[in-house]
Amino acid sequence: MPKFQGVYQDRRGGWYFKASSHKDPLTGRWHQITRRGFITAADASRARASFVAELEASPPAAALAGLTVAELVDAYLDDASSGGLLSAKTLFDYRHYATHYIGPYLGTKLVRDLDAETIAAWQRALTKGGGAKTGKSLSANTVRIARAPLAGALKYAVSRGILKANPMVSIPPPRIPKKIPQHWSPEQAREFLALHEGDRLFPVWAFLLGSGLRIGELVSLRWPNVELDRRLVRVHEFATVLGYEVVRSGGKSRDAVRTVDVDEHLVRVLRQHRKTQAAEALATADYEASDYVFTRAGGGPYHPQTLSKVLVRASVAAGLPRLTAHGLRHTSATLMLASGVAPKVAAERLGHADTTLFSNLYSHVTPTMQREAAERIGDTLFGV
């Protein structure tokens, strides 16, 4: 009796075939089908050959009818990771959002059944009590963040032919109330520095306020990239935190790599800091040598979260508004604009990719700048 590939005889004497359908491009699994009811092995073999040929010509979406939202999001993130389409920090955050905000509500739903109303209901559920960790309602900003991996996954599904249209397109994200970034006034910034002058972390706080660097840029800064005689700092090394692990990154934006001028006051602070650092290296037997500008007393770079937590405690102890390291960056930006620095120059100094977004973020400083501009024009036209 001739044998045919994938063809088998059942207990009643009939014939059937087995064949693998498309390999699921998202999950990596092969889908197997079985067709029965053939009188002869040859009939089953011809039917199998026809099935395989037809399947090879059909779109892969035919094999993905049972794909769940959780599988789609996982596949999207795996593909983005292998293709280098998202940064390590973004991938880490997206997986966190998927685990806590998408999976518990939409994870088991079939992608084919996901419609606009389901997504709208999901957003409402998050707003009312959607924190999977705490069950507390989420802010509009957190809901917008939670949408990001789902939006990316649905775009991915459309591009792969799994969906004909993206159901999220018609559901806008919740509107975020405009808030002024938390910052200190010039007087409060001076007060904080005066209180901490002579403290070991004074150079860190002074540099963050004077330069506007991100905390991940500050902890990555090395002495070879600091030219004190020319009063220049080259920013081209970056760090980000994944959970608690510090990893190197490519920078927050396309303009993150930049050269920042520093004033003579910061130069004096850095010169003194370098002397302190050298003295600590001589006085410490197991000093962790490195070329980082800002190091712990025993050497080695700071952890970004450690500095931010210390700053929070220090600001509260000083009786000032509670600030993180990011708050010092906002303070630096506000001080620049209030001092008359052009928004484009301030944005470039801070490594902002979009000057318009930067100006919108710090629009609370604009009225003062507008008033000063009006007075200067008036003085030019009508002043003595």
Image (cartoon, grey):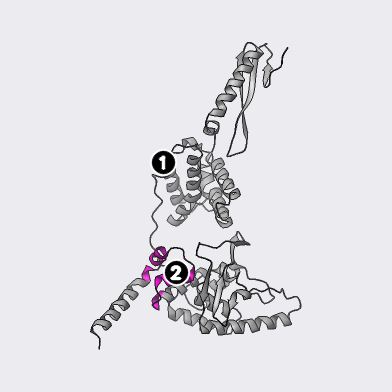
- Identify which residue is drawn at 43% across, 39% down: 165
Location of the N terminus by quadrant is top right
Image height of 61 relative to 268, above or below:
above
Disc 1 residue type (three-letter) = Ala
Query: Which region is colored magenta?
Result: 337-364
Location of the C terminus by quadrant is bottom left
Residue 356, horizontal then vertical, whole percent: 39, 64
Disc 2 residue type (three-letter) = Ala
Q: Decide: few, some or many residues near mark 1? Use Cα within 10 Å; few <14, some 14-19, many ≥20.
A: some
Q: Nearer the viewer, residue 304 or 372?
A: 372
- Identify which residue is drawn at 43% across, 72% down: 345
Image height of 197 relative to 41, above or below:
below
The label number, if any, that marks residue 116 in the structure image:
1
The label number, if any, that marks residue 239 in the structure image:
none
Tag 2 residue: 347
Disc 1 on helix, strand or loop?
helix
Q: CA distance from mark 1 to mark 2?
A: 38 Å
Which one is in front in this view, the residue at disc 1 or the one at disc 2?
2
**195 inside magenta stretch:** no
Report if residue 351 is visible in the image: yes
Disc 2 on helix, strand or loop?
helix
- Identify which residue is drawn at 41% across, 41% down: 116
Q: Nearer the viewer, residue 64 or 189?
A: 64
Residue 355, horizontal then vertical, whole percent: 41, 65
